[in-house]
């Protein structure tokens, strides 16, 4: 599933092509996404200018003067800016056509993505209103993480992946952050010292920034907005490396299922 760096990479790629552009039409070829594309979307967007292209967690927000389109890439979705007359592929479900002849095209083979509409402030939308702080914001630090973890027996990796605690830290980057912080992903979140929470928060930011700068992680379906793959995968130290040697100590990297997700860690480096 595309995680925060992949979504931010997409946002940065499409924003220059969308900002201050007038929407001329919306073509919905298949409305059957995770939630149906609202039938009124075309009527609402037609003639509007896109004033901002933002990200909240793994959601993309296209703000106009009358409301906001909320996009989610699901498990296999991607966005491209293409000429309006380019032939759609099999899973190109929606085009948002722009003045000047280009279109923002949503491609989603598994149809777990979403394209929704709200006239209210998007932060009040049911999908967004309970989200935690952005991991790259000042609101996320060791003190905050320690406060969220206080008294909780939840494994620390599950805590990091809880969008109500912090948004966008999915399976890949949680594993990588815990490795850099030297923390066993199985350890109870409430039994980690404050100084280690501070280190963990710093590692989360470090890993995400590096991934964004590298263009995200290519795992199966994700490619960048320009069609090129992300390259952070070459920097993954534990994720997907079960049975291989730890790059720090040489011990065998272990894998297990934790909170229903594949988890990778070094038994010697992570305590």
Image (spheres, helix red, strand yellow):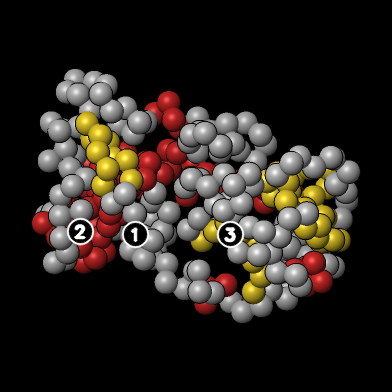
Task: Examine the image and state in which quarter residue 54 appears.
Answer: bottom right
Q: Which residue is mark 2?
A: 154
Quick one: label 3 or label 2, which is nearer the N terminus?
3
Residue that appears at 84% across and 40% down: 87
Q: Is residue 110 in view from this perspective? A: yes
- SS of the residue under disc 3: loop
Numbered disc 2: secondary structure? loop
Q: CA distance from mark 3 to mark 2?
A: 29 Å
In the picture, measured across the screen, residue 236 lies left or right of residue 249, that is right
Label drawn at residue 138: none
Disc 3 crowd rating (10 Å Cα; few below 14, some 14-19, many 20+) is: some
Circle 1 sits on which residue?
162
Query: Is 44 situated left or right of 118 in this image?
Result: right
Task: State whether residue 106 is above or below residue 66.
Answer: above
**Which comes before the other along the chain, label 3 or label 1?**
3
Residue in the picture at 60% in, 64% down: 35
How far from the left and from the top, in percent, is residue 208?
Answer: 41, 44
Hey, which residue is sitting farthest bottom in the picture?
120
Tell me which residue sits at (85%, 68%) in the image.
47
């Amino acid at each position: 599933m595309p995680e925060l760096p992949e979504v931010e990479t997409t946002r940065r790629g499409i924003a220059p092509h969308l900002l201050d552009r007038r929407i001329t039409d919306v073509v919905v070829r298949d409305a059957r996404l995770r939630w149906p594309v609202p039938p009124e979307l075309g009527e609402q967007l037609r003639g509007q200018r896109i004033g901002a292209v933002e990200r909240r967690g793994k959601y993309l927000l296209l703000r106009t003067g009358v409301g906001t389109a909320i996009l989610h890439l699901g498990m296999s979705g991607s966005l491209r800016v293409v000429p309006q007359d380019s032939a759609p592929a099999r899973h190109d479900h929606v085009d948002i056509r722009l003045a000047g002849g280009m279109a923002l095209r949503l491609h989603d083979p598994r149809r777990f993505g979403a394209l929704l509409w709200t006239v209210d402030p998007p932060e009040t939308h049911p999908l967004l209103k309970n989200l935690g702080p952005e991991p790259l914001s000042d609101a996320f630090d060791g003190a905050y993480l320690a406060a969220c973890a206080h008294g909780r027996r939840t494994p620390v990796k599950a805590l990091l992946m809880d969008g109500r605690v912090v948004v966008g830290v999915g399976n890949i980057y949680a594993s990588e952050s815990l490795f850099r912080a030297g923390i066993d992903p199985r350890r109870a979140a409430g039994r980690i010292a404050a100084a280690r929470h501070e280190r963990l928060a710093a590692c989360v930011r470090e890993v995400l920034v590096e991934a964004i700068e590298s263009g995200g992680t290519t795992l199966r379906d994700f490619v960048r907005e320009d069609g090129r793959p992300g390259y952070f995968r070459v920097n993954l130290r534990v994720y997907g490396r079960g049975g291989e040697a730890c790059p720090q100590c040489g011990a065998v990297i272990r894998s297990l299922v934790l909170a229903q997700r594949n988890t990778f860690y070094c038994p010697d480096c992570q305590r």
